[in-house]
Amino acid sequence: MTSQTRRAFIRPAWMVIAMAAAGVGAFAWSRVGLLDLPSVPHDLTLDATGLGNLDAMRDLDDAIRSDSRADRVSNGALPPAAQRVRDGLLLIRAGKPEAGLAAMQQGVAQDPDNLVLSNAYRMECFTLRRAALADARRASAAPVAATGAVNSVFPAYLEAQPIAPLEKLKKDHPSRETRLALALAWVDEMLLFPALEVKAPASVESVRELTVVLEGDGSTDGKSSAASPYYVPALFARGLNHLHRPARLVWPEADKTPLDAAVQDIARCIAVGRKFNAGSSRLQATLAIALGDAYVKIGRSQNARSWWQIAQNICRDEAIQQAVRRRYAWRDETVLDDLEAELDRARAELDAPMTDLRMMWSTP
């Protein structure tokens, strides 16, 4: 066989392999209904799930983070709020973080329900606070205290960021999006200060806000948002909160939380995504891995392995494949301890915090 003939053969062969892999992933995602997923209302709308307009969200996110001066998105110039957030990002890159965060905060206030803008603002706060903590640790031989010394290690403009501004935003404009942003800010606090005395109350605050989003708070003042039980970002965030709580510690609200709380929330996410075939293959696989992990927490390792297999089939991304391979190596008798160690490792990966909503609108 000549080299030209071999190349002609290899190209279609790789195309067949790629198409087969995509087909297996699609088949796996379509068959997950066989694994005890909850039902989803037939009249549920995509807007109610928070999964609508993911392409537009990705385009806006790309535009505000671009180095280009074009300041354009597909439908024209950036909206004023997005432009303000972009201006803030450019100021931070130019070494003016205080002015940059102030500009971003103003942009978020102009469009409080825009998750792209609030996520960008929150992630910049996270990055700057993380850097300040690292500077403090380098400047002192003693470890920075997990509690009681937070303000002392941050410059004044970072002391209350981003929780205080987001609390005010939620008060002025209560909605599922502003509550979600605040809840995720509490999780950011947990990631930066992993000591239990910080992590436990921060998780409780986060879950409280997310539960109001999902279940409502019974308010009759006309200002609070209605219950959104199929709002995927809040479901996944609450599910992760429950998943990441240490299995062998009694949590402050343990008596109010079902043992399978993480399974319930994450399974509902997957059921909604399956109904609309929404989200990238990476997002679908991430949800499947998380549901498998949640099943480990309640002692159903066979269910867990089924979901990890589905994740492996859905997405060929190397990080996803490695995450599944690590889980396959766990033995049943040590699987819970192995999972706890894996979750600890995931929380420590602060270069890509689990609260970054860009995974919702990213593409494979």
Image (spheres, rainbow, N blue to C red):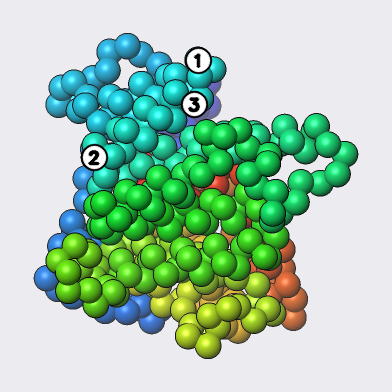
Q: Observer-nearest residue: 203 or 174?
A: 174
Which quadrant of the figure contains the C terminus? top left
Q: Residue at x 39, y 24 (%)?
A: 88
* Rendered image quadrant of residue 111: top left
Visible residue check, residue 143: yes
Query: Under tag 2, what secondary structure?
Result: loop
What percent of the width, then of the height, locates residue 321?
A: 57, 52
Per the image, label 3 sits on a secondary structure element best described as helix
Q: Earlier in the sequence, mark 2 or mark 1?
A: 1
Dot 1 corresponds to which residue?
94
Query: At 72% across and 63% down in the image, what residue appears?
Result: 341
Q: Which residue is found at the position 12% from the left and 70% from the top?
A: 43
Q: Calculate the distance from the C-alpha at mark 2 to the C-alpha at mark 3.
A: 21 Å
Q: CA distance from mark 2 to mark 1?
A: 25 Å
Residue at 46 percent across and 49 percent down: it is 163
Mark pair 3, 1: CA separation:
11 Å
Badge 3: how crowded within 10 Å, few (<14), some, or many (20+)? some
Q: Amino acid at mark 1?
A: Ala
Farthest residue in the bottom direction?
255
Q: Are marks 2 and 3 in contact (CB under 8 Å)?
A: no
Mark 2: amino acid: Asp
Which of these two is toward me, 328 or 246? 246
Q: Would residue 351 be found to the left or right of residue 137 on screen? A: left
Q: Residues within 10 Å of mark 1 (few under 14, many from 20)?
A: few
Looking at the rendered structure, which numbered label has been put on residue 111?
A: 2
Measured along the vertical axis of the image, is residue 188 above or below residue 84? below
Q: Nearer the viewer, residue 354 or 285?
A: 354
Residue holding disc 3: 98
Find residue 120 and report its horizontal and vertical position in percent: 41, 37
Residue 230 position in % (x across, y down) = 27, 68
Position of residue 107 relative to residue 152, above or below, is above
Q: Is residue 28 visible?
A: no
